[in-house]
Image (tube, rainbow, N blue to C red):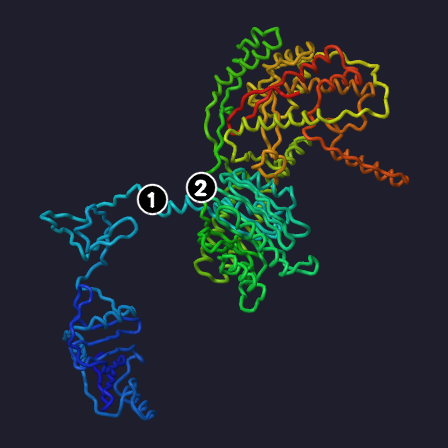
Amino acid sequence: MSGCSLYSYPGKQCYQLQCLHGIVLIRNVASTVKSNLTYGSCRQTRALMKWTKHGCTCLLIPGLDPPLDITIFVDISVNPGPQSVKRNLEENCSMCKEPSLHIASRIATTTYSRADLMSIRVGTRCLVSSFVCYQLKSNGLLRFRGKRAGKRKITTRITLRNQTRFKNNTFLDGNYEYFSHADVTRNKSIGGLVRNYNNLIIVKTSDLPDKNCISDSFYSKFALWNARSLTRKTALVCDYILSEKIDVFVVTETWLKESTRAVADITNTLPDHQLFNKPRIGRGGGVCVILKKGYSVRQLTLPSFRSFEYIALSVSCGSTCLCIVAVYRPPPSKKNGLSADIFFNEFPILIENLAALPGRLLVVGDFNFHLDNVSTNRDAILFLDLLDSNNLIQHVETPTHNRGHLLDLVITRNSDTVISDISSSLQLPSDHAVITGRISVPRPKSTRMFVNHRKLRNIDLCAFAQSICASSIITEPCSDLDSLVHQYNTDLTNVLDMHAPARPRFVTLRPHAPWFDDSLREAKAKKRSYERKYRSSGLEIDKQIFKDYCNGYYRRLNDAKTSYHRNRFSNVDQRSLFREVEKMTSGKRTNIFPSSLVDPADQFLTYFNDKIRNLHSKLCELPVLEPNIHLPPCTCSSSFSSFLPVTETYIKQIVLKSPTKFCELDPIQTVVLKQCLHVVLTPITNIVNLSLGGGSMPDALKVSQLAPVLKKISMDPEDMSSFRPISNLQFISKTIERVASPQLIDYLMENKIYPNLQSAFRKGYSTETALLRVQNDLLEALDSGHQALLVMLDFSAAFDTIDHQILLGRLKSRFGICGTALSWFWSYLTSRTQYVKVNGKTSATTPLLQ
């Protein structure tokens, strides 16, 4: 700016200053200011100004009477000359009757140089009122650099034990106190001592934990998703749960039945989780909840309703209890005959039942109310009024459907702080978004199991076989059966402890996904990068790129899983194939036991024994009815008096065909036994022949270990009646049974005394063949014009309530079993013992009730 001209207009007290490179506007803003200013600890005597991208604005010039406001604007043209400036001014003035603040009047001009203008702005000092400074600061216009040049002042974090001396210079922020370099010098003398505060370090107190640590351990991560068929999305759901570390995952519209492959697939992939499924009724629908096993979960029994389906769970961890209710309300239509009025009549009944339950409440699900359009939607208004009348509040605010509707809701009591940090994402394929948040329930730790681990893979099989050959079972075998069995168990246990000692330790349950290779990990990392880009930009194009890559990642994940199972089943026989398919479709047995049990092993044993004892007492109380028809006693002309001895070759075939199962009663793992079978084949053959030939079963082989298992996945694990005992025996005991059974069946088939309609425990006859036979007989009877009557009986604990004396009598009279063979059956059935083992704890051993 080389120079400028000043135009004055009498009576208006307005001045406009036009320069070569911009416009300077001068106005009379106030009268003389004579008051003092004290703002904080600084006294204001400089001009108040603000720098912007369009130039410099001087808000107040101290020292002038009256004070002037000078504004220097940006260039209005590139290097304008004096002639063009004067011509523009004349044209602007001719178009208006009176001059304004931006248009100069036709009066004489006064020329100012750059030095003159700068002397006016900088050369004077005055005190400004505190009110003016407060207004400027509140509007963000008062920004000072201070008198010292250099870098910005850095706040130093220090800790003081004595806070009384620095009461005016300190302030608390969280758990620590802060000092500013502007208030404290580098070396300050206090009480005659010189202290350098820059040498102070942070001292963290142990009684005040970090906020981030509190949030991670005291909160659980929650997710809600409308899947629209979970059948082909199990791999995606498991991958999402593991990636996002979801503790509670609620899925609506699962389209699942009571027991499907999808349920087994999830439980097999996530052994550390438990699944509670509410099967669908008819077409669509269905809800399920997937939780970590660290929670104590109890499924609530509440009345069912017509207009919606739900599942209610009482989830507790430590002293915190939360009632989670997953709801799905199908949209009303003519086919289902539902309406919103039916829901408004039934949903308050559910709320009343939930109000009587202890703990806090969390109701989530797809309600199919358009809460995004509350102003015109009648049903949405009535639903919100219903929530408000029951002191409930809805937390989701963003649309959850791809058409912009708010359908998926998270509802809590107005006074409860249950959920926080609610957000939505598009990571799973559906027309609904995934709703995530944090619930105020402590996050459970990973499930750990106590096991006695042996490093079987490190065993030197040659040295192991040599140790067995040097043991007494090979060099000096006993001739007595009981002593030989004891010698077999003792010597093999000692050899195993020598080569692979048992080391007790805790094992953490990990997810089982062997198809997840390095290529999928790289694709997953790239998917997360696209997600971060979309979240940071918020652009529609980034959103579409992220969704397209997610679909490609899901296809690659499903293809990898399919390829893994195809290669796994390509080189197995038919029996192994059916066994593996059964594991995939039925799922692993979950060891979930009632949380109220203090000593679960002894309590389960008492429950199982009392159940059999009560059934026996009830059977004895029934009156004995004399039959109207007296049949002659059934006799058998043939007889089976003894078992034939077997060779080592036959025993080898039996052992190799047996499943590789292991019981804790076995002295050696079955997989190691099969690898060293050539060494222990002779002792096993001697035990089998002595048992069958002598007509006795050793007492050491009549001990069974009971494992409580849920009858169905959908049953309540808190009820002991939902469990049934699974008996585990030694491998050598099962081998003796596999040798005796074929000889007995061959005898029954040769003499044609085998029941024709027998289906259980018979090769080639299964449940499917039995059902086909019954259906075929009914159809033939109806086609022939006869009447058909079907009687179906279900016995509770049928095998446990069999009278052994009646069984032995029928074996003798109807089937001709006698001599040594009958003695073996009597020894096999009598003097049996059992115990229960739960979570590494063993109960007392009790005799089996007969």
In percent of width and height, residue 466 lies at: 53, 13
Q: Residues within 10 Å of mark 2 (few under 14, many from 20)?
A: few
Task: Name the foreground residue: 94 vs 228.
Answer: 228
Task: Name the foreground residue: 749 vs 560.
Answer: 749
Of discs 1 and 2, which sits in the foreground? 2
Count every numbered label the image shows and give the total: 2
Q: What is the three-letter code of the residue carrying label 2?
A: Ser
Q: Secondary structure at mark 2?
A: loop
In percent of width and height, residue 441 lies at: 45, 45
- Mark 1 and mark 2 lie on one chain; the one further toward the N terminus is 1
Residue depicted at x 30% and y 87%? 100
Q: Distance from label 1 to label 2 (Cα)?
A: 20 Å
**Residue 71 in the figure: left or right of residue 187:** right
Quarter where residue 406 is shown: bottom right
In percent of width and height, residue 486 lies at: 57, 12
Say which residue label 2 marks. 319
Quarter that holds the N terminus: bottom left
Say which residue label 1 marks. 209
